[in-house]
Image (cartoon, rainbow, N blue to C red):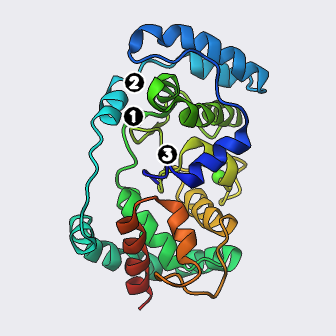
Amino acid sequence: MKTLISAAALSFMTLSGAASAATCGNDASGFNTWKQQFAAEAANAGVGQRGLDALANTSYATRTISADRNQKSFRYELADFMRIRGADTIVAQGRRKIAGNPTFYASLEAAYGVPAAVIVAIHGMETGFGNFMGDANVVSAISTLAYDCRRSDFFSGHAMAALKLVDRGSLSSNTVGAMHGEVGHTQFLPGNVLQYGVDGDGNGVVDLTNLTDSLASTANFLRQKGWRPGVGYQEGQPNFAVIQEWNAAGVYQKAIAIMAGRIEG
Ligand SMILES: [Ca+2]
């Protein structure tokens, strides 16, 4: 869900309340002061000791800031995008995933009304079916982005969510994810884990590095965003608008729909 820094994500900020008043900065020098200020806000917002300890344990995420500053906007045509992202491989592997565990995928479909092919296409696209879920410390990455002045308002809500997830055992000081703090098989930002996360395997913890939890949460996200069971999802059909909630990039949206269609076909 890497480029979901758009309307869908901003609506989460609205739900999560006022922006942080802690003092942002553009380099590491003010991070410790920010942590103390944000800790006070977090305590007021109901974050418990485990979450506050995780915030205290964070360090300034230099790699994340470097990646954020150097983001390039790629403007691929759809066909090039699909080739570069390995669409044929995702389709072939996606079919095998469903064929290899039909009961699980049928149960997902029954519970949320979202075709397994859509979930599997997203899984393949986001992490190569869980092969690479990232190597950045999530709480440090998301806290650093909340501190950084560039998009402090957007990431402060996700940083607060991350601390609440530490309280609940969904994240820890050691959890790793992508550079902007996306976690698990389908790369949810922490605010979305808090809002849409599902304990799919029923062990009492929402853990998006767990396949069952992650795919159930992905289906739940789409359902909560308005997915209508039994209705089409290709461009021009009603559920395509829901796929657009997943990722802001047009080529990404079309690629998911096309790959899912081929997995089903
Ligand atoms: Ca679980």
- Label 1 or label 2, whichever lies nearer to me, is 2
- Mark closer to the chain start, 3 or 2: 2
- Mark closer to the chain start, 1 or 2: 2
Residue topped by disc 2: 61
Q: Does 249 sit left or right of 114 as displayed?
A: left
Identity, as a three-letter code, of the amino acid under mark 3: Val
Q: Quadrant of residue 163?
A: top right
Q: Are marks 3 and 2 in contact (CB under 8 Å)?
A: no
Q: Are marks 1 and 2 in contact (CB under 8 Å)?
A: yes
Identify which residue is drawn at 50% across, 84% down. 236
Q: Residues under labels 3 and 2: Cα distance? A: 16 Å
Residue topped by disc 1: 136
- Label 3 or label 2, whichever lies nearer to me, is 2
Identify which residue is drawn at 48% across, 56% down. 186
Residue topped by disc 3: 183
Identity, as a three-letter code, of the amino acid under mark 2: Ala
Position above or below: 52 against 194: above
Mark 3: is the Cβ under 8 angstroms from ligand 1? Answer: no
The label shown at residue 236 is none
Pinpoint residue 14: horizontal percent, then vertical percent: 69, 43
Mark 1 closeness class: few <14, some 14–19, many ≥20 residues within 10 Å = many
At mark 3, the secondary structure is: loop
**In the image, farthest residue toward the bottom:** 265
Pinpoint residue 213: horizontal percent, then vertical percent: 60, 57
Identity, as a three-letter code, of the amino acid under mark 1: Ala
Q: Does 172 sit left or right of 2 as displayed?
A: right
Identify which residue is drawn at 48% across, 78% down. 117
